[in-house]
Amino acid sequence: MRNTLYCFTLDLRIADNHLLQAAIDQSKAISFVYVVDPSWFKPSNYHHQPVGELRRQFIWQSLQDLQQELSSQGFDLTILYGETVGVLSTLLRTGHFDSLAMAETAGVYESQQRQALLQLHPDVQLLSDWSHTLYTPSQLRSAKCHPEQQQGWKSFSYFRRKVEKANLKPFALQSSHFIGVQPIRLEHIISQDKELKTATLEHLQIGSLAARAASAAGSDLYGHYAYQLLGGERAAHDHLQDYFLSGAASTYKQTRNALDGRYTATGFSPYLAIGNLSPRQVYWSLKQFEQHHGGNESTYWIYFELLWREYFQWLALAAKHRLFRFRGLVDSGPLTSFFPERFEKWCQGNTPYPIVNACMHQLNATGFMSNRGRQLVASCLVNELGVDWRYGAAYFQQQLIDYDVASNWGNWQYIAGVGVDPRGGRHFNLNKQTQMFDPDGDFIRRWQGQGDGAALDSVDAVDWPVV
């Protein structure tokens, strides 16, 4: 039985958190922390912040909810501000912890952080588990589609066939029980160590967002359900229940390409990204819905897209740094470059393509964009504007509240033709897509997509583009 430091990352929940339960079961005393890293705010990711304002707000809401849940069990959640490895290393040393619990994730940099901590503290036992995926490594090995087996990992179809043929079942759901373990308070450690700082709203730089949210809630322009999602496990469970009670799952395949609207998409992605929900909880809620209402193409498609999410998680684990490489997983990169003015106009929604502008205005105001919208704006950046796909992926990382490293960078690779798409990328006809998905122009008008009519490129005195 150990003294354990539990660091929450992408598992901000109590229910269906197997690592949390394992840490409790193996510890005599435990302390819970979350680290807000100053690297979030540095424009180091192709000139963009790794974590943007709207996602920081969503994270903060989730942390407040988690604090309340832990407090009801007699435990604290200490939110600290500082470089992650340094903060955790200081706590491990000064708090005399002999065990560190951190969830496994697909991110290569997060894996490096865990390894750095183990090198600094070789006597500390690492407790870890996959809290972010539908299946476990052992389940994938039995289905012969684990990344270490290197079989068919450039094909989602291969992965899906193997997983479905094996008929793998996720773990049964369970809630964490805080019986037999004592809390370790960190107040005295923090007060005595100048390197440790408690995180505040000022650190997260989200004070102005409260006024923005209040304004948006009363506006016809921003008054759609997806943009008013609150972070937190309880809000996630409410949304999960409401979605299936609405019956929208039975028509999901017909509505999933809509650019806007209540329950046209499931709305699960923000909660899955931060770990307010586990994919197993979504899966079992879907199965329960099918048991009572019957399954069809639409309910299967929700599972199908859970599998796409799953595939990207394990592909990212296998790809490591290649997930962020210009040529991605293939031998040569796309015929693109970086045009600062074009990229800026794309970010601000001022291109010659109204459907793209509307989607980007939606993203910038809300932190959300439909799956169809993401495909269209990505195709525009790569194919119409000729801009390096990594800048678009980095901008999405900054702006999206449902940012997930594997899904975001994997999908951008897919569009750019440097990922797992056997067709070598996707180029969408924007006029045709507009006619299909916004035939009356309602979405473009709502999100003011017409632009100012300015030329895509500024030109010099002899009409050469200024790049």
Image: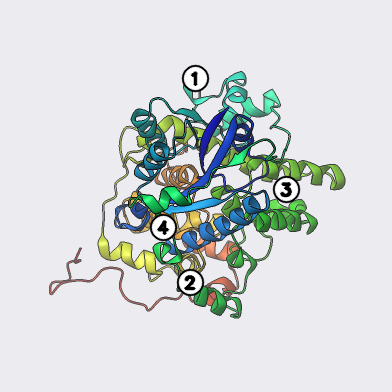
The C terminus lies in quadrant: bottom left
Q: Residue at x 68, y 23 (%)?
A: 166
Looking at the rendering, which quadrant does residue 316 occupy? Answer: top left
Q: Amino acid at mark 1?
A: Gln
Task: Answer yes or no: is residue 55 visible.
Answer: yes
Residue receiving disc 4: 398
Who comes first in sequence, dot 2 or dot 4?
Answer: 2
CB atoms of marks 4 and 1 within 8 Å: no
Mark sitting earlier along the chain (3/2): 2
Q: Which residue is mark 1?
A: 149
Residue behind mark 2: 209
190 vs 294, left or right, is left
Residue beneath the point at 37% across and 39% down = 89
Image quadrant containing the N terminus: top right
Closer to the chain start, of discs 3 and 1, is: 1
Label 3 to label 1: alpha-carbon separation: 32 Å
Q: Residues within 10 Å of mark 2 (few under 14, many from 20)?
A: few
Return the disc, 2 or 1, that comes first in the chain's sequence: 1
Q: Would you place residue 24 above or below residue 266 in this image?
A: above
Tell me: 123 left or right of 76.
left
* C-alpha span from label 2 to label 1: 46 Å
- Badge nearest the viewer, 4 or 3: 4
